Amino acid sequence: ATQKVNVEEKLSLFSDHWNPRIIGELNGQHVKLAKLKGEFVWHQHDNEDELFYVIKGTLKMEFCDKTVVVQSGEMIIVPRGVQHKPVAEEEVHIMLFEPTSTLNT
């Protein structure tokens, strides 16, 4: 059945960090919401691209050669095989698009 999803409502249901929640699925992709705070670990996904859409806050995506600042209302796609480290100095709310096969590091 076709249903809409209230993103703010879903975000209000959890408060832990770095623990994405699946809110939808399409074409073999999971749509996830997560709250981030602090630094994650350097990692890469060998077989999947990863899309981060920032709903609230400022996300710094560190790469080996640069840091990209992603603001509320912006998105970044991390290509497969690229080392990256998400950093959130203050709490950041994001929507992630990842293949269902992607393992949360």
Image: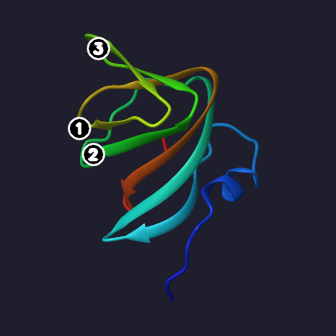
Cα separation, mark 1 vs mark 3, equals 13 Å
Please tell me which residue is depicted at 43% across the width and 42% down the height of the picture.
53
Which residue in the protein does label 2 denote?
49
The residue carrying mark 1 is: 79
Q: Amino acid at mark 2?
A: Asp
In front: 33, or 58? 58
Contact (Cβ within 8 Å) of mark 3 with mark 2: no
* Helix, strand or loop at mark 1: loop
The residue lying toward the viewer, choosing from 32 and 43, is 32
Q: Position of residue 102 (x, y in %)?
A: 39, 53
Residue sitting at x 62%, y 45%: 19
Q: Which residue is mark 3?
A: 64
Three-letter amino acid code of the residue under disc 3: Cys
Mark number, residue 9? none
Residue at the bottom extreme, as displayed: 1
Percent across and percent down for residue 5 are 58, 67
